[in-house]
Amino acid sequence: MTKPKGLNAADFGAEVGELENAAGNPLFKAVQLDWSQPIDWEKGKKTPTDRKDPCVYIIMHDDGRYRHKKRIVYVGLTKDPSKRFLNHPTAHDIVNRQGKASISFSFFDFIQGRNKIERIKEASEEIEHILIWTLWPYLVNDRKMYTLPGMGSNGGSAWHILNKGYRFHGQMPQQIVYPWMLVKPGRNRSAKA
């Protein structure tokens, strides 16, 4: 399959935060993820945090090769990061690989106002799923890789995700708008004046 050429984001005439539906509610729910500096995760050690707040996390692996330095390899979600990794085989496999592993956390900051998040659990699941789809090429996640975000039995919402804090060597987009419409402009073949 060839890469689509000439696609542009549709211009709806407003900034993402200004777009509203017919009822006057924002089209996109907004969340800010403030990523922590990565914490080294040594082989055989428990998770390097004592925090107990719900969060999304990213595990990175550095095998020492120049092209693979601190590559994002796993995106996850937890209610309690201090206990999540007691039984997490995939995380332990990553930590035990040759090289170094590190982990970064972001605790949710839902941008309120008229943009109320009624179901925090579903919202955080959707955000995790969108991050997995955004960062997928090198991930070892085994869930949420093969269905589009929002296409499950619960449906989904439109999200505007603002990523702040640690930048993951350019692997993490500063903003993610999902879903967004891409269009290929047509050519104006009307009579020339």
Image (cartoon, rainbow, N blue to C red):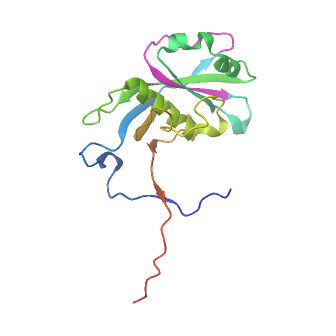
* Quadrant containing the C terminus in the rendered view: bottom left
Can residue 186 be seen at all in this image of the molecule?
Answer: yes
Left or right placement of residue 160 versus residue 101 in this view: left
Residue 190: x %, y % from top left: 43, 83
Residue 48: x %, y % from top left: 56, 14
For the record, the magenta segment spans 42-61
Residue 166: x %, y % from top left: 50, 32
From the viewer's side, name the closer residue of 173 and 182.
182
The residue at the point 53 percent across, 10 percent down is 83
The residue at the point 54 percent across, 64 percent down is 6
User: Main SS of the magenta segment?
Assistant: loop
Please tell me whether residue 85 is drawn above or below residue 15 in the rendered image. Answer: above
| Quarter location, residue 162 | top left
Residue 2: x %, y % from top left: 67, 58
Please tell me whether residue 33 is drawn above or below residue 102 in the rendered image. Answer: below
| Quarter location, residue 147 | top right
The residue at the point 59 percent across, 13 percent down is 85
The residue at the point 60 percent across, 9 percent down is 86
Is 160 within the magenta? no
Please tell me whether residue 99 is drawn above or below residue 20 in the rendered image. Answer: above
Left or right placement of residue 139 versus residue 155 in this view: right
